[in-house]
Image (cartoon, rainbow, N blue to C red):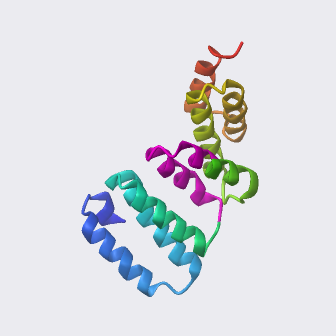
Amino acid sequence: CIYQEKGIFDLAEKNYEKALDLATTSERKSSIYENMANMYLYYRKDYRKAINLYLQAIELNDSGNLYKDLGRAYYKIHQKKKAEEVWLKAVNEKNFNGTYFKRGTYYFLALYYLETKEYQKSKENILKAIELSPNNNQYLTFYKKLKRYIP
């Protein structure tokens, strides 16, 4: 992760691969795949590679936490309906380890629905995000902006 943060991605990937060889549990391997996927999503901007890595992580440990960023990767490659499907699956069916992932997923859904001009759905999802994080300025600002579209 340190190499990744320093932008030395080839060395980061080599170390992730070593860690995969040493990992003894499926949960640990899933976590390593998730770290690699995050590197491809956020730093290398190789969204298809990120998707493949998230799917490998999910296959090993199917938790709700991975779906927020998997949906984001789909969104980045303009598979917006697939992104929506993944996010809805996450908030409706998956367990999350914390509210961070769930509230972020609701926020992404709200953004998506604003873009598709489904204002009522956008409002419903941002309100769910706000319910989980009532003092989040980003969500509150978004909600104020959304009020322009919904009386």
Nearer the observer, 46 or 1: 46
Residue 56, position in %: x, y? 52, 71
At 67% across and 38% down in the image, what residue appears? 129
Residue 148, position in %: x, y? 62, 14
Residue 10, position in %: x, y? 26, 68
Residue 91, position in %: x, y? 70, 50
Is 146 displayed left or right of 22 in the figure? right
Q: Quadrant of residue 17?
A: bottom left
* Residue 75 falls inside the magenta stretch: yes
Residue stretch in magenta: 63-84
* Residue 114 falls inside the magenta stretch: no
Residue 136 in view (yes/no): no
Q: Is residue 125 above or below residue 56?
A: above
Q: Main secondary structure of the magenta part?
A: helix
Is 15 displayed left or right of 103 in the figure? left
At 53% across and 72% down in the image, what residue appears? 30
At 54% across and 43% down in the image, what residue appears? 80
Residue 130 in view (yes/no): yes
